Image (spheres, rainbow, N blue to C red):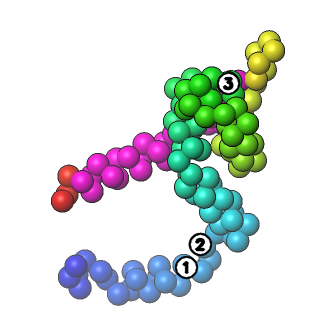
Amino acid sequence: MSAADFPEQEHQNALNHLKESMPANEELESIVGIFKAFGDMTRVKIILALAKTPLSVGEIADTLDMSQSSISHQLSLLRQLNLVSSVRHGRNIHYRLSDQHIITIFNQTKEHIVEDENDQ
């Protein structure tokens, strides 16, 4: 990067506004909590499955070859972070992603990985 690509005055202005633009600690804690949730392969698999269709605990357990109690535990964590929600269908509760932002994060991450692999 040349000096022309990095104007000093622009840099100083950005530096002066940096502290003001930093999110509050409460918001940062929420962001970190979501990334921690994404740091577990089982939770990622659950999110990817729910991106396709709403599923019951039993359906998720069968799909991932895991116990229902393990899936229920992971879903509880995902619900606390508002990443998944539930809706009753007769006697079953089906889980789904709370919104499309969640799968957008995954898609962008995948694009980043593919882009990095292509650059090498």
On the question of residue 99 being in view, the answer is yes
Q: Looking at the image, is mark 1 or mark 3 nearer the viewer?
A: 3
Quadrant, the N terminus? bottom left
Q: Position of residue 44 (x, y in %)?
A: 54, 44
- Left or right side of 8 for 71: right
Q: Are marks 1 and 2 in contact (CB under 8 Å)?
A: yes
Please name whichever residue, 111 or 95, is drawn nearer the observer in this view of the structure.
95
- Give the residue type at disc 1: His
Query: Alpha carbon of mark 1 to alpha carbon of mark 3: how far?
Result: 50 Å
Count residues near mark 3 (Cα–Cα under 10 Å), then give few for <14, some for 14-19, many for 20+: some
Q: Position of residue 90 (x, y in %)?
A: 80, 12
The magenta stretch spans residue 6: no
Q: Looking at the image, is mark 3 or mark 2 nearer the viewer?
A: 3
Q: Which residue is mark 1?
A: 17
Count residues near mark 2 (Cα–Cα under 10 Å), then give few for <14, some for 14-19, many for 20+: few
Q: Is residue 6 above or below residue 37?
A: below
Q: Point out which mark residue 79 bears.
A: none
Mark 1 or 3, nearer chain start: 1
Q: Which residue is mark 2?
A: 21
Q: Which residue is mark 3?
A: 58
What predominant SS class does the magenta segment belong to? Answer: helix
Q: Position of residue 114 (x, y in %)?
A: 29, 48
- Give the residue type at disc 2: Ser
Q: What residue appears at the point 69 percent right and 28 percent down from the top-left corner?
A: 57
Span colored in magenta = 94-117
